[in-house]
Image: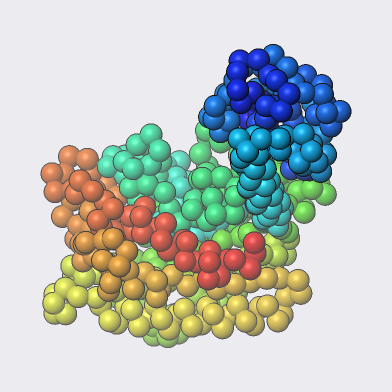
């Protein structure tokens, strides 16, 4: 490892080296060789002469390394040549202790780098489908009011940029990509500032406001789930052109495909339009209807080569600030009816993963449930460093999201890290970080 270690040498007594007074400050390579600056190779036993005295080798400046010798030979030379006075023995002992501790540190570093490389090899890309929980800016490029590419959104994002993420900073899939050693953010597929080279290791097709149900995406004129799948097919064509057929197919089969949606189907569609899906389905039947769509979508991904899929569950919908604000009869507490629907639907999603793992050969489908960790954050905020859970940071924190959450509102909080929610519907960056960390450790770790 020439040029990569700190090493030098000096005399213990005067500015000129005398026999019995030489000591060396050594650098190490992972392979166990020791690199010495200048002079002849140490194993030949010539004493290094005319070197400047060094009192503390740990603080010595970096040298250019020229020679190396086996660790065993240096140990021999240290024992035979340098143990001539008590002072020299002390220095040599200090050198040897430093040698061993540095070797251990480098060994640990090597192990980490090997594991890091293995993680990247196992999951070379994160591919995302869903709603505003994982939209990184696709809605910026379509005619819809479901946008967040303006302040104060993104104020805690790197550079303070509003990217179209419905948060003050990063979202869960950004943190997941970082945990897998890929990159700190996952770009939106429709963002013109990115290209296939960026998308090769991670991309999101998600659209804020969408759901499993096509009727849900029609509410705010956003990208329906079937269209996200069409974008994915287009992405695959570009990836094959970029990487080549074989490598692209391998990348797709090894990539982690993340699905995060469903909340809008209930809160923005089913419960918002009594004459719509409510007139066609009971809530239980509507859940089953959505499960059927989810099943077909996962099978479509499988048919396109996906083999690693994370199916996201619903959060405690009744505890979102908007739902608490409208739950007047419940004292503005969490809406238990909505939370029960979340739990029921999550159980059906979990059951679906079991069934499809049996049915589809070679698939690894997992259920990523954010419900309980988010509920625990809401119930025990101080355990996570939060102070406010019932209202959001932006504006009054009760109703505002999208364009109603704007930079001119004087009520917006100054420190979003104290709040579980950023706007009336979406978590803060800090909450996203906690939830994603939980999901990675508890569920996605099997992909590492």
Quarter occupied by residue 115? bottom right
> Left or right of 236: which side holds 180?
left
Q: Nearer the viewer, residue 135 or 310?
A: 310
Q: Is residue 17 above or below residue 448?
A: above
Quarter occupied by residue 309? bottom right
- Judged from this view, the residue extending furthest toward the front is 85
> Left or right of 71: which side holds 222?
left
Residue positioned 64% across, 82% down in the render? 355
Residue 187 x, y percent position in the rendering:
52, 44
Residue 314 x, y percent position in the rendering:
42, 71
Asked if residue 27 can be seen in this view, the reply is: no
Q: Nearer the viewer, residue 96 or 342?
A: 96
Image quadrant holding the C terminus, namely: bottom right
Quarter occupied by residue 342? bottom left
Q: Nearer the viewer, residue 389 or 84?
A: 84
Residue positioned 68% across, 30% down in the render? 24
Asked if residue 76 can be seen in this view, the reply is: yes
> Left or right of 157: which side holds 47?
right
Image quadrant holding the N terminus, namely: top right
Residue positioned 61% across, 26% down in the render? 12
Residue 159 x, y percent position in the rendering:
38, 34
């Amino acid at each position: 490892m020439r040029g990569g270690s700190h090493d030098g040498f000096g005399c213990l007594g005067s500015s000129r080296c005398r026999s019995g007074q030489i000591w060396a400050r050594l650098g190490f390579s992972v392979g166990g060789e020791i690199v010495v600056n200048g002079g002849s190779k140490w194993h030949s036993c010539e004493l290094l002469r005319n070197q400047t005295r060094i009192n503390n080798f740990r603080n010595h400046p970096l040298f250019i390394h020229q020679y190396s010798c086996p660790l065993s030979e240096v140990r021999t030379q240290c024992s035979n040549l340098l143990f001539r006075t008590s002072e020299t023995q002390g220095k040599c002992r200090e050198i040897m202790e430093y040698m061993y501790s540095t070797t251990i540190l480098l060994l640990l570093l090597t192990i980490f780098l090997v594991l890091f490389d293995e993680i990247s090899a196992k999951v070379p890309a994160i591919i995302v489908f869903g709603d505003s929980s994982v939209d990184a800016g696709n809605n910026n490029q379509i005619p819809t009011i479901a946008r967040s590419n303006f302040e104060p959104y993104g104020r805690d994002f790197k550079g303070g940029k509003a990217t179209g993420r419905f948060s003050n900073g990063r979202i869960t899939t950004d943190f997941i990509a970082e945990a897998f050693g890929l990159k700190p953010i996952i770009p939106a597929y429709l963002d013109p500032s990115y290209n296939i080279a960026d998308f090769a290791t991670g991309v999101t097709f998600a659209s804020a406001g969408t759901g499993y149900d096509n009727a849900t995406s029609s509410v705010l004129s956003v990208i329906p789930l079937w269209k996200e799948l069409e974008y994915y097919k287009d992405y695959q064509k570009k990836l094959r052109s970029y990487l080549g057929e074989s490598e692209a197919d391998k990348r797709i089969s090894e990539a982690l495909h993340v699905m995060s949606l469903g909340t809008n189907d209930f809160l923005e569609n089913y419960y918002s339009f009594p004459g719509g899906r409510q007139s066609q389905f009971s809530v239980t039947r509507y859940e089953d209807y959505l499960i059927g769509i989810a099943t077909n979508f996962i099978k479509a991904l499988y048919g396109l080569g996906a083999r690693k899929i994370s199916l996201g569950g619903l959060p405690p919908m009744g505890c979102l600030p908007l739902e608490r604000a409208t739950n007047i009869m419940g004292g503005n507490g969490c809406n238990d009816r909505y939370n029960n629907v979340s739990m029921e639907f999550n159980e059906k999603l979990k059951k679906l993963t079991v069934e499809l793992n049996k049915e589809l050969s070679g698939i690894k489908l997992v259920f990523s449930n954010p419900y309980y960790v988010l509920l625990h954050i809401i119930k025990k905020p101080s355990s996570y460093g939060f102070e406010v859970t019932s209202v959001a940071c932006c504006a009054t924190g009760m109703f505002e999201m999208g364009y109603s959450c704007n930079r001119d509102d004087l009520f917006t909080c100054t420190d979003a890290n104290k709040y579980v929610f950023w706007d009336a519907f979406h978590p803060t960056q800090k909450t996203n970080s906690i939830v994603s960390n939980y999901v990675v450790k508890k569920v996605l770790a099997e992909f590492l």
